[in-house]
Image (tube, grey):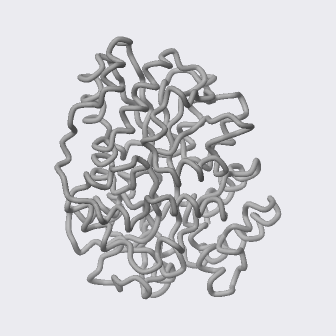
Amino acid sequence: MSDLKTLLTGGLNRRTVLKGAAAGAVLAAAPAYVRNARSSSGSLTVYSWGDYKLESVIADFEKATGIKTTLATYGANDELENKLRASGGKGFDVVFPSIDTRTNYDNGNLLLALDEKKIKVDAIDAGLWRGSITSGGVSKGKRYLIPHIWGTEAIALDSTKFPAKYGELSYAHMWNGDLTKKVAMRQKSVLIGLAIYLDAIGEVKSNRSLDIYKSEAEMRRVMDGCLKFAAAHKKNVGAFWNDGTQARTAFTDAGCTIGQVWDSTGLELYKLDKKWKFLMPKEGGIGWIDTVGIPSGSQNVEQAYAFINHLLDPKVGGYIANVTGYNSAVKGAEAHISEVAREFQKAAYSGDSTEKLVFWPPQPPYFSKVRQEYVEKLTNA
C-alpha cells in the first residue's frame, strides 16, 4: 500500500487539478508525434469503458493520422477480460484495464509487452508512472500497462436529504434510517466500502479492507462479516448497478437518493442538478487507476502506439477529464479542465479526503472467484 501512495504524490492529485485554468472542451490539432503516424494509415479497433466517451477523441485522431478507428465499449473489467480470453487476445488493438486486474491477463498471455521507446513516457505524470511499476503495470521486468486516468468510488447523494459536508458524511448514511429502496450500489465494490466502514467502527477488523488481499481465508472472513451486515439491511437497496449508465439511472429513474458510485456518475448528476453532490465518506473513499494496453493478438500494433500517444496529449487528457469527472495521468491536462469540472472537484474533495483513499491493490489469484461468489450471495440475499 505504501507504493500505491506514491500515485498521489507525483504532482497529480485532486488539489493539483483544481489549480488548472478553465478551457474549452474542443480538442485541438494533434501534436507532431501523432501526426507522424499518418504514414502508417491502416485501421484500429479500440475497446474502451463506455463512460470515457471517446468519440470526439477518435474523430480527432482519425483526422490527424488517417487511421480508421472503430470503437467498442464495455462497462466492467470482467467484460474486457472475458472477451480477450475468449478470443485469445485477438479482435482489439487498444484496451483499458484497471491496473489491479493485470494479473488476470497473465494466464493466456493476453497482453503485449510494450516497447517504452514507442511511447511518449515523458508526457505521463512521474508519480503515476513510478507507482504503476509495483501496482500492476509491470511484470517480471516488462511493462504491459501505462497509466491513463485515475478516479474514485464514493457517495453520491441528494444534498437536500443528507449532510453534504466532508467529515460528516459516512458510509453509515447508506444503511441507517428509513431508506427502503433508496440506495444505489455496485455489488462488487459495496462490500469493500462496507469493509472500510465496519473496520472503522470495530465491528469487522480488516485494516481498512486490505486484509482481504492477504489470503483467501482472510477474504472470506471479512466478506462474511460484510455480507451479514448488508443482508440485514437489504431493504435499503433500490438498484444494483454495473456500469455508468445503470448508476446514473438509479438516481434519475429508480428513485435512489444516495449510493456508492464512481466519480463520473457524480459529475453527470451534478450537471443535471446541483442538488446532487459527490463526497468522500469520512472513513475513506475507494481509489482506482485505469491503464492503456495492447492485446497480444493485435493486428495493428503500430497504429495502437499512435493512438496511445494521442491520448498523452494534454488537451486530450483535459477533454477526457471534462467529460468523465476522472483525473488524467497526462502532465498539463489540469490546465484544460472546464469550469464545471473544476467546480465539481472542488466540492467533492476537501480536507484530507485524498490522503484517506484506499486504492485497489493488485488482485491475488483467488480474488475474482471469491468476489463473484459474494456478489451472487449479496444479490440473492
Residue at 39% from the left image edge and 58% from the top image edge: 247
x, y (%) of residue 359?
Answer: 58, 62
Among the 4 quarters of the image, the one containing residue 19: bottom left
- The answer to which quarter of the image holds residue 271 is bottom left
Q: Is residue 175 visible?
A: no
Tell which residue pokes out farthest to the front in this image.
122
- Can residue 138 be seen at all in this image of the molecule? yes
Q: Report the front residue among 1 and 30.
A: 30
- Check the picture and name the quadrant holding the N terminus: bottom right
Q: Nearer the viewer, residue 130 or 138?
A: 130
Across and down, in percent, residue 138 comes to 66, 41
The correct choice, above or below, for 19 with respect to 376 in the image is below
Q: Is residue 76 left or right of residue 166?
A: right
- Give coordinates of residue 369: x percent, y percent: 71, 49
Q: Position of residue 334 (x, y in %)?
A: 32, 55
* Closer to us: 245 or 48: 48
Horizontal side of residue 282 vs 220, given as left or right: left
Residue drawn at x 29%, y 80% is 159
Residue at the spot x=55%, y=66% of the render? 190
Q: Is residue 139 above or below residue 108?
A: below
Quadrant in the picture for the C terminus: bottom right
Residue visible at 63% across and 23% down?
Answer: 88
